[in-house]
Image (tube, helix red, strand yellow):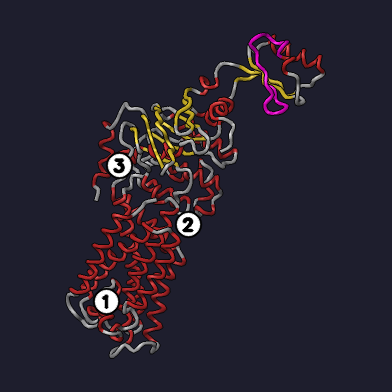
Amino acid sequence: MPGVDSTFESTLGSAGDGAPAVEIDGLVKRYGSTTAVDGLSLTCARGAVTAILGPNGAGKTSTIEICEGFRRPDGGTVRVLGLDPADPALRPRLGIMPQTGGVPPAARAGEWLRVVSRFYAHPLDPDALLGLLGLADHRRTPYRRLSGGQQQRLSLAAAVIGRPELVFLDEPTAGLDPQARHACWDLVAALRAAGVSVVLTTHQMDEAEKLSDHVVVIDHGRVVAEGTPASLTGAERQLRFRARPGLDLEELLAALPPGSAAKESPSGHYIIEGQVGPQLLATVTAWCATEGVTTEDLRIERRTLEDVFLELTGRELR
Amino acid sequence: MSTIATLDLTPRPGAAPLHRMVLAQAGAEIRAMLRNGEQLLLTMIIPILLLVGFSTAPLVDVGGGARVDFVAPGILALAVMSTAFTGQAIATGFERRYGVLKRLGATPLSRAGLLLAKTVAVVAVEALQVVVIVAVALALGWSPHGDPLWALPLLLLGTAAFSGLGLLMAGTLRAEATLAGANLVYLVLLGLGGVLFPLDRVPAGVQHVLGLLPISALTSGLRTVLSDGGGFPGGPLLVLLCWTVAALALAARTFRWE
């Protein structure tokens, strides 16, 4: 019997202090002939929120499950809080929200969370946590009778109940309604404010843009871009408007300062890039006036993370 | 109104003491077993119905003596098999399927701790079964003869052997295959293991082979101790020990957690 369990806490102070939350170097993971992760390297800082973005099949879940100790890598090194992910000393220090499941279908929400809380030395109060996540009325509801969003929130509660140093959230807001999504965002913000390191995967660009200090875009098992949301979207601004499809952009470009670019994407949606300022705005609206074009939804904005993501990973469906 | 910002999320990690983790998990497993209708049918209702039916109606020629004296030890063995083997195999198979075992692996509860919790839960439910079965059997006029203390090592080693077999099945087969297989094995062993039908009717060669089944060893051991007032049940204990070692060793090698 592992009497060592009770000594985890006493060894905490020395284990991997000062190391990054996650440090991955040259990670490789294969399933048969498929290479899911192909020499991926990234670092997640302590106390920060890192979002891992990527299309389906990019290797996000494989990477995060290796960090969680669920899978072993085929190559490269992974350190979590300075330790091997398989090190049992990590278990009390990590909070994990898997993409799906992990809860017995017949278990009642409140009872299950209470059982999980009993595995930790200084857990949060399960009832208070359920209340804050809007599950107070579902304490006695079996897991299988909870809605998808309620199941996600219960799983999120279990990830933080042990007061971990590092939390892994695999697509925490997939399938959530707007209220539940905001509750999740509030929780991530609160974790960050409390000094907890958070690593999350998501498809939702607004989520990554809003929540994270650091964004890592991965595709085909490699990092294709990383940085702060602002550095990825860049300082460049764009003029966007909607109008009838098929405007003659060559003619518009001729009226604009050199170095400007114009495109229609998708049909009826126009994007003008270049020295975006009052002058350019005036030129575009004047040109539209002479052409008899009515513009709608005209605005100046930065590129979104979604634009960057699509540029990096392509528009192809997979 | 309180908000999420009022939670104290400052990291304060630490594992609970092993005994607290194990008791919490064992409690959850016990609740799950007692709330599951099919499990209760298997572990409580069927054994009691068989006990009452075969003790009161002349369904089988048990030789001399009161029917209940023959049937009760067999039913105790059946109760052990239903909880330690069938119930545990099915429950664990579906826990594996639903990612429950994987999720628990991400908590401070170690795999050894989880197995300990499962053992505590199985033994607790068996204790409940034994109390109910003994009470019903006594009401039916059962008069056990031997030293009931000798029944204890038989019940414990039987539990270990059947748990090993159940986990072997749950850790290697798909959940549906475990469900079907565990029920089938339950029925076959119920029929062939001397639980209700004395083994001395079958040819001697077959009898020897059937006598090596874990259920036959447990049944005959309990019958020797409780009906015939025999002492140390060495033969049955040896058979159960062999099954325990083989099944647990094989399960430990082959068990897949997800």
A291 and B195: which is toward the camera = A291
Residue beneath the point at 33% across and 60% down: B168
The mark nearer the N terminus, 3 or 2, is 3
Residue A217 at x, y = what percent? 49, 29
Q: Is residue A255 above or below residue A246?
A: above
Residue B85 at x, y = what percent? 35, 65
Q: Is residue B91 above or below residue A126?
A: below
Label 3, on which residue?
A88
Mark 1, mark 3: which one is toward the viewer? 1
Q: Amino acid at mark 3?
A: Pro
Which residues are the magenta region? A253-270
The numbered disc on residue A106 is 2
Query: Is A264 one of the magenta-colored residues?
Result: yes
Chain letter, disc 3 residue: A
Q: Crowding near pointer 3: few (<14 within 10 Å), some, many (20+)?
A: many
Marks 1 and 3 on same chain: no
Q: CA distance from mark 3 to mark 2?
A: 29 Å
Q: Is residue B232 left or right of residue A57?
A: left
Based on the displayed image, in which of its 4 quarters is residue A247 positioned? Answer: top right
Label 1, on which residue?
B209
Query: Is B221 one of the magenta-colored residues?
Result: no
Q: Is residue A54 left or right of residue B253?
A: right
